[in-house]
Amino acid sequence: MKYDAISKELFIKNRTKFTIQMKPNTLAVFNSNDIFPISADSTMPFQQHRDIFYLSGVDQEESILVLFPNAQNENHREILFLKETNETIAVWEGEKLTKSSAFEVSGIKTVYWLQQFDTIFNQLMSEADGIYYNLNEHLRADTQVETREDRFIKQCKSKYPAHAVFKSAPLLHKIRSVKEQEELQLMQTACNITKKGVDRLLKFIKPGVWEYEIEAELAHEFLWNRSKGFAYTPIIASGKNACVLHYIENNNRCLDGDLILLDVGAEYANYASDLTRCLPVNGKFTDRQKAVYNAVLHVKNEAQKLLVPGTLIPEYHQEVGRIMENELVKLKLIDQTDIKNQDPNWPAYKKYFMHGTSHFLGLDTHDVGLFHQPIQAGMVFTCEPGIYIPEEGLGIRLEDDLVVQDNGVPFNLMQSIPIEIDEIETLMNA
């Protein structure tokens, strides 16, 4: 792995938070992701399933974690099953975890090779009354591909039909949404790497540059700083492209007078950062660009004040909508007649600001969390209002990553990344 070793104490704490919520005499199973094929003998780069990583720190394919707090054999209360490594595998694929190194990573003492799984798991299931399956229950999930986890659940249901079945997702969504200090440090590192990418761009962008060249500059800086790269597919959207919310082609030339909307973020140790900034191609904002930019910045500054313990997310989004409504009236994009005649289910401001303001952030860019529960200290949210005016070829979104704190003032993990117009213009023209 490119990243520095993470203390196993983090994963020990994470497992404890999960197991204390389990029902008596049940076990839980977590599988790694598959390595997905492209064609012929080509594969996509491996990405570990975030849940097994969160609970064990194991960042390797063909891994299984079993948690059984009430197992009669104390050694079987936490078990890792790993792909057996040998000299041949080390030569062809690189070193894999050994039993001793797996303990150093995870804090789990009992480690078996994967070929022992069926025999040992059968013994465990003979003791257990129920099992927790780890289904993908993210609200935005739309998975068409059968995963390693899906195959395991299908086989397990067939072989052990009499066991009670429970869901891991609600437990994980609850505990993963509140970050430990070690996690916040990893996320801060990801944000710091993102800042280095932005600093590089402030010196690089000029009329005539291509969007993909900007993407390449970021990729270089991210990899140079021990990131695997982008936490999500980068958006480098100049001019009218900024009005396409998920524009990822990044294949247009950046023209003098246009703005570039950059929605990019580095990952570090599987943790995501998520940034949006808008930069003038020629280093200077026009008066109109300034007016819209400052309106978005005002909404962001006011919105982040609402990210405090006790806030309900649906009410938060409604209040941000009211703040945005006022700004759009000032910009003469909507008027009181539009507001009076608006559809309550799609307010007038939605014509120019059609997406949500915040989402959970962590191991996933759109991280898991309980959207119907009050916000808690230790949660991390993006804050990303935007105004999109297709008829003007102008789209502006601004986004930072914020840690909710007990004192009511969120901590901005991206506070060192320039966002004020004067600072951006000064740095681009230095």
Image (tube, rainbow, N blue to C red):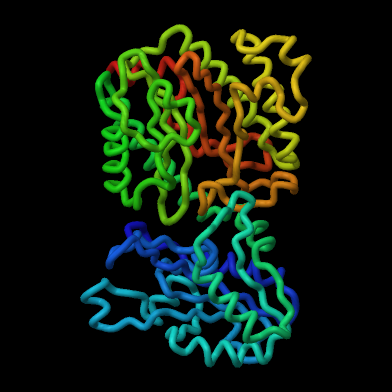
Residue 282 in sight here: yes
Instruction: Report the residue at 66% width, 72% height from top.
Output: 19
Q: In the shown orientation, is residue 114 left or right of residue 16?
A: left
Q: Is residue 39 above or below residue 263?
A: below
Q: Is residue 165 above or below residue 110?
A: above
Quarter of the image for residue 18 reads: bottom right
Q: In the shown orientation, is residue 387 left or right of residue 197?
A: right
Residue 342 spot, x, y in % from top left: 75, 20
- Number of residue marks: 0
Quarter of the image for residue 234 reads: top left
Q: In the shown orientation, is residue 98 left or right of residue 93?
A: right
Instruction: Report the residue at 75% width, 35% height from top.
Output: 315
Observer-nearest of 171 and 346: 346
Residue 189 in sight here: no
Residue 118 spot, x, y in % from top left: 52, 88
Q: In the shown orientation, is residue 95 left or right of residue 387?
A: left
As drawn, which residue projects farthest toward the left?
91
Q: Quadrant of the N terminus?
A: bottom left
Q: Is residue 69 above or below residue 369?
A: below
Instruction: Report the residue at 37% width, 17% height from top.
Output: 258
Q: Is residue 396 above or below residue 81?
A: above
Instruction: Report the residue at 50% width, 71% height from top.
Output: 148
Observer-nearest of 215 and 375: 215
